[in-house]
Image (spheres, coloured by chain):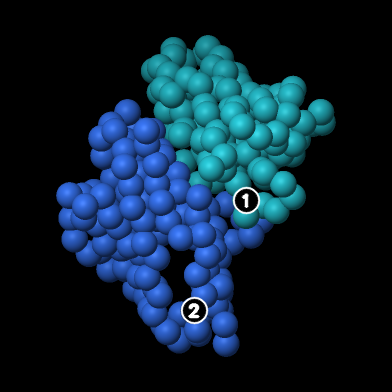
Amino acid sequence: GQNIDQPTEMTATEGAIVQINCTYQTSGFNGLFWYQQHAGEAPTFLSYNVLDGLEEKGRFSSFLSRSKGYSYLLLKELQMKDSASYLCAVMDSNYQLIWGAGTKLIIKP
Amino acid sequence: GAVVSQHPSRVICKSGTSVKIECRSLDFQATTMFWYRQFPKQSLMLMATSNEGSKATYEQGVEKDKFLINHASLTLSTLTVTSAHPEDSSFYICSALQGDHRETQYFGPGTRLLVL
């Protein structure tokens, strides 16, 4: 079967760095997405990785290793507004999205 | 975890025809489902909130007569794109709400619509 695993919840301190991991097993691979979702709002696109390596975009970076079926989202200089759920999703060989359950990130002062 | 399915996974239709997309929660009841639209590498845009047994709530700018939503049961919501045009080509994603907290949404795999 296909599945995406990511931690249910993480806690970090304002100003610190946090890494949210995502492992996947899917039939085929056409890219991995990270979204941020604040409560009551639609998910916001953060990143898309289809090749191995690190993609940096401001305070957020996303890493992919296709051979390991692994990705992480790295958030630097954490701000209180970063408190949200972070969703990992993989597009399979049929261009269908397989969603992780999301990681709730709690930022403490 | 909770599973949400969509059918069909992809559809190609001629301009002017109508297309129905189904969203099902397979192992839980969902009184609320959401319909999103996504363009490549962009954020999901909420189109409407579907409530079982009542009329859907549409976001500003979404034509309710063009995107018909029916939430007939606690496990099924349908989105019908009426008189589809090429600009309606997109990736349509539904999600189902388990419980009362909007952060516990479970997303479907999406339906790719291509209108020729």
- Residue placed under numbered mark 1 in the picture: B104
Residue B58 place in picture, x, y as percent: 70, 39
Q: Chain of mark 2?
A: A
Question: Where residue A12 is drawn, which disc sits there?
Answer: 2
Q: Quadrant of residue B67?
A: top right
Q: Dividing the image into 4 quarters, which one contains the C terminus of chain A?
A: bottom right
Q: Amino acid at mark 1?
A: Thr
Residue under the image location 40 percent in, 65 percent down: A20
Marks 1 and 2 belong to one chain: no
Q: Quadrant of residue A91?
A: top left
Residue under the image location 52 percent in, 75 percent down: A11
Q: Chain of mark 1?
A: B
The answer to whether the residues at label 1 and label 2 have Cβ atoms under 8 Å apart is: no
Residue A76 place in picture, x, y as percent: 38, 78
Using the numbered discs, state the Cα–Cα distance from disc 1 to disc 2 in whole angstroms: 21 Å
Q: Amino acid at mark 2?
A: Ala
Q: Quadrant of residue B19?
A: top right
Circle 1: element type: loop
A18 or B21: nearer the eye?
A: A18
Residue under the image location 39 percent in, 80 percent down: A17
Side of B63 where A97 appears, left or right: left
Of all chains in the rendering, the one displayed in blue is A
Side of B105 where B99 appears, left or right: right
Of all chains in the rendering, the one displayed in cyan is B
Residue B58 visible, this angle: no
Circle 2: element type: strand
Q: How many marks?
A: 2
